[in-house]
């Protein structure tokens, strides 16, 4: 397999992984957040942002 073919395969797999994350977020996470009141919605995003800022994606 040539280098260009390996790079193409790797980039295709990484794009599919990113698409999966976005789809999961849109299908599972956002509908749950949509059911929250405005203050709860903002608080949920603040907590999520704090986890991301602390570089702790898994609690």
Image (cartoon, rainbow, N blue to C red):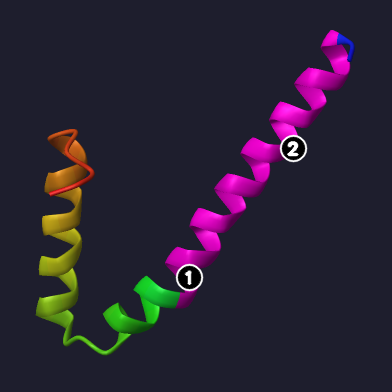
Badge number at residue 12: 2
- CA neighbours of label 1 inside 10 A, class few (<14), some (14 to 19), many (20+): few
Query: Which segment did they paint magenta?
Result: 3-27
Helix, strand or loop at disc 2? helix
- Position of residue 22 relative to residue 33, above or below, is above
Asked if residue 26 lies in the magenta stretch, the reply is yes
Residue at x-position 15% and y-position 46%: 51
44 or 1, which lies in front?
A: 1
Q: Quadrant of residue 46?
A: bottom left
Residue at x-position 86% and y-position 14%: 4
**Quadrant (top left, top right, bottom left, bottom right) of the N terminus:** top right
Residue at x-position 19% and y-position 55%: 48
- Marks 1 and 2 sit apart, C-alpha to C-alpha, by 21 Å
Residue 28 falls left or right of residue 41: right
> Contact, CB < 8 Å: mark 1 with mark 2?
no
Nearer to us: label 1 or label 2 = 2
Q: Position of residue 41 (x, y in %)?
A: 19, 75
Badge number at residue 15: none
Badge number at residue 26: 1
């Amino acid at each position: 397999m040539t280098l260009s073919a390996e790079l193409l395969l790797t980039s295709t797999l990484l794009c599919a992984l990113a698409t999966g994350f976005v789809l999961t977020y849109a299908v599972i996470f956002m509908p749950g957040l949509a059911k929250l009141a405005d203050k709860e919605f903002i608080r949920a995003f603040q907590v999520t942002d704090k986890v991301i800022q602390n570089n702790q994606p898994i609690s």
